[in-house]
Image (tube, rainbow, N blue to C red):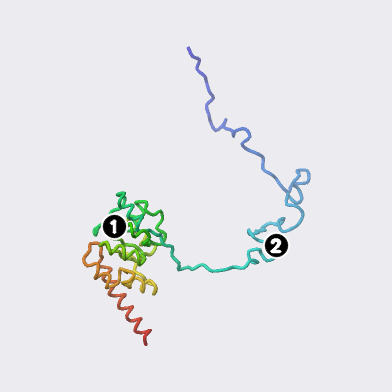
Amino acid sequence: MATRIRTTRVTLANLSPAQGSQHNPKRVGRGQGSGYGGTAGRGANGQKSRSGAGIKPGFEGGQTPITKLFPKRGFINQNARTWAPVNLDRIQYWIEQGRLTSSPENPITARELLMSGCIHDVHDGIKILGDGAEHFKDPIYVIASRASKSAIDAIESKGGKVVCQFYNPLALRDCVKGRTDRVAAAPTRREDITWYTNYRNRGYISPATLKSLGDLPFVEERWKLLATQLGAWKKQEFDVQKK
């Protein structure tokens, strides 16, 4: 018969820390016999021996820091945008692989390109480029932020449609997430209004672009309203500059 091993019951009275897990704190300024008396391990005098000496990283004792001695060139444009480029030959390859589909009811947007792995980051928006147009053969419907002239010509020559829509960061995130419960922001900067009201760019608030799209399912009523409102503003600004 096996012998039962009796263990001591663990209580607050017999609890103790593991051996070597705790050390006595260093008590400085308690006399020369401890080895940390007098200057308390800080050395003799000097800035670092004083209490409250908050020396910031990069501080060089009051002399001109080296970061200020080197000349600076260029600047950072706060309004610059980084577009995620997508070439037509890549889109064609994804369609042939069955990883992308396009129809008037479900056009290709940033969400489809990202979810299919055609791009890995939407950055500030999608830009369709015309590289590989000679391999492009399927009619597609695309809603992007920008599109080159060669890409527009190639897509429309095959019977497809491309529309450039303005996206601010929140609207682009909603597009990627598939949210439709919020109204997308309209362009407010003069440059954006001018760009997206130009038919040559296939801007979504250009009356000529909306006329060419006709009654396609993905055309929103808000686009027509913005085309009316911003078109009137653009005409007013042009009249003011003309005077």
Residue 52: horizontal and vertical position, in percent?
66, 58
Residue 149: horizontal and vertical position, in percent?
35, 67
Assess disc 1: are there few (<14), some (14-19) or many (≥20) residues with their C-alpha within 10 Å of its C-alpha: some
What secondary structure is found at the residue carrying circle 2? loop
The residue nearer to you, when weighing 21 against 128, is: 128
Amino acid type of disc 2? Gly
Above/below status of 144 relative to 224: above
Look at the numbered discs 1 and 2 and tell me whether their residues touch, using CB distance below 8 Å.
no
Disc number placed over residue 61 in the picture, else none: 2
The residue sitting at the bottom extreme is 243
Query: In this rendering, which labeled residue sits more in front, label 1 or label 2?
Result: 1
- Residue under the point 54% across and 33% down: 12
The residue nearer to you, when weighing 55 against 59, is: 59
The residue nearer to you, when weighing 143 against 94, is: 94
Where the C terminus falls, by quadrant?
A: bottom left
In the image, is 120 to the left or to the right of 99?
right
Residue 181: horizontal and vertical position, in percent?
29, 60
